Image (cartoon, rainbow, N blue to C red):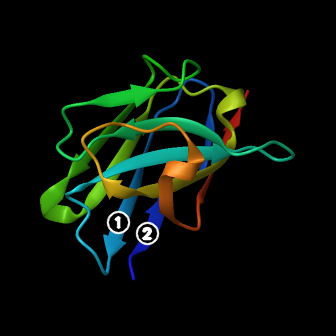
């Protein structure tokens, strides 16, 4: 059974940068589309970014496009989310997710993801 563990979240100021990491154990991630989602307090979980199996295709929510970058390192079985120019509205718990099928495409829907990490908290102060 795959386990996903996120790290890197912390309290930062508006305009700062953070890099989140998602390390997998129990399964090789290389064939699968991976995604990052976030959930702010009192709100539903929302799509942030997705990357296909080989990193050639990525997609982003409009709210983070141009500021966030998703990437992956097959050798480390890890997916990253580089977040620049952070805003207070980026404050949320960030979750890494692994798709349920071999990933030639990127996916935005929560239903496409079968495995989730426990989340890492990002707080952006103004």
Give the side of residue 15 with respect to residue 7, left or right. Answer: right
Give the side of residue 111 with respect to residue 57, left or right. Answer: right
Give the residue displayed 28% in from the left and 75% down from the top.
27
Crowding near the residue tagged with mark 1, few <14, some 14–19, many ≥20 C-alpha atoms within 10 Å: some
| Residue lying at the far right of the rendered structure | 42
For the N terminus, the image quarter is bottom left
Question: Which residue position holds label 1?
Answer: 23
For the C terminus, the image quarter is top right
Question: Is the residue under label 2 in contact with that under label 1 (CB below 8 Å)?
Answer: yes
* N-term-proximal mark, 1 vs 2: 2
In the rendered view, would you say 42 is above or below 15? below
Image quarter of residue 76: bottom left
Image quarter of residue 12: top right
Give the residue displayed 51% in from the left and 36% down from the top.
108
In the rendered view, would you say 84 is above or below 62? below
Residue 37 percent across, percent down from the top left: 56, 45
Crowding near the residue tagged with mark 2, few <14, some 14–19, many ≥20 C-alpha atoms within 10 Å: many
């Amino acid at each position: 059974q795959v386990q996903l563990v996120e790290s890197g979240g912390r309290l930062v100021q508006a305009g700062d940068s953070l890099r989140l990491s998602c390390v997998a154990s129990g399964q090789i991630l290389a064939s699968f589309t991976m995604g990052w989602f976030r959930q702010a307090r009192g709100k539903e979980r929302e799509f942030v970014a997705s990357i296909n199996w080989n990193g050639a295709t990525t997609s982003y929510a409009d709210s983070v496009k141009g500021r966030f970058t998703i990437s992956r390192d097959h050798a480390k079985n890890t997916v990253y989310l580089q977040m620049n120019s952070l805003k207070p509205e980026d404050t949320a718990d960030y979750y890494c997710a692994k798709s349920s099928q071999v990933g030639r495409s990127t996916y935005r829907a929560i239903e496409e993801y079968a495995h989730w990490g426990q989340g890492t908290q990002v707080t952006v102060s103004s």
